[in-house]
Image (tube, rainbow, N blue to C red):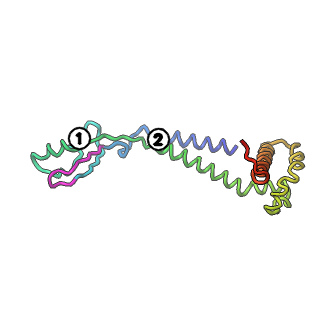
Amino acid sequence: MKFLFGVEALCLACFVLLSQVSAKNSEDIRCKCICPPYRDVEGQIYKQNVSLKDCTCLHVVVPMPVDGKDVEAYCLRCECKYEERSSGTIKVTIIIYLSILGLLLLYMVYLTLLEPMLKRRLFGHSQLIQSDDDVDQQPFANAHNVLSRSHSRPNMLNKVEHAQQRWRRQVQEQRKSVFDRHVVLS
């Protein structure tokens, strides 16, 4: 339910941003002229918000650093390029990035706060208090009993818990193989 609300909010935000893209901002288009050093004038970069047809040295380089007949020679050395960007696409990309980051943050909060409470309720408080040494000796002493009791209520949490238990058993077996028996799986 909450996931659908998040998806709807994201779609609405994308729609609003894309509707604003139709009107170009003056920051989205520009002409950039790179002029190298000329006689006693240092090299400069000039930027102006002008149309594509006005993207020339004469329209962009203001104020003109040289006078009279040197203007044409100076402008021939300048390289002017018309640049256009889509700020709407940039905004949508940032919103998607921040949404994914927010979802990952919510998942981290779930893993750090809610999952331990759910495990405490499923496995009992005593198993969580055991030290790491006890866990290494009997990692899942009552896991089978708890899982068999929880199969009466099949839901997603039980499926995930069962997959975690199976993975942990496999990891424990690999640790025994590598560290105790010194056998590497091929």
User: In the figure, 21 relative to 116: above or below?
Assistant: above
According to the image, label 1 marks what residue? Answer: 56
At a point 66% along the width and 41% down the height, the residue shown is 4
Q: Position of residue 121 (x, y in %)?
A: 83, 55
Q: Amino acid at mark 1?
A: Thr
At a point 78% along the width and 44% down the height, the residue shown is 163
Quadrant of res 179? bottom right
Q: Secondary structure at mark 2?
A: helix
Q: Position of residue 23 (x, y in %)?
A: 40, 39
CA–CA distance in space, label 1 to label 2: 28 Å
Please indicate whether residue 171 sits to the left or right of residue 4 in the image.
right
Which class describes the residues within 10 Å of circle 2: few (<14), some (14-19), or many (20+)?
Answer: some
Which class describes the residues within 10 Å of circle 1: few (<14), some (14-19), or many (20+)?
Answer: many
View extreme (left): residue? 69
* Between discs 1 and 2, the one toward the N terminus: 1
Q: Nearer the viewer, residue 134 or 162?
A: 134
According to the image, label 2 marks what residue? Answer: 89
The N terminus, quarter of image: top right
Q: Position of residue 86 (x, y in %)?
A: 42, 41
How many numbered marks have been drawn onto this rendered protein structure? 2
Q: Secondary structure at mark 1?
A: loop
Q: Position of residue 60 (x, y in %)?
A: 24, 45
User: In the figure, 113 relative to 149: above or below?
Assistant: below
Q: Is residue 38 covered in magenta?
A: yes
Residue 71 badge: none
Q: Is residue 115 covered in magenta?
A: no
Q: Amino acid at mark 2?
A: Thr
Region rendered in magenta: 31-42
Q: Nearer the viewer, residue 46 or 29?
A: 46
Residues at circles 1 and 2 in contact by the CB criterion of under 8 Å: no
View extreme (front): residue? 182
The C terminus, quarter of image: top right
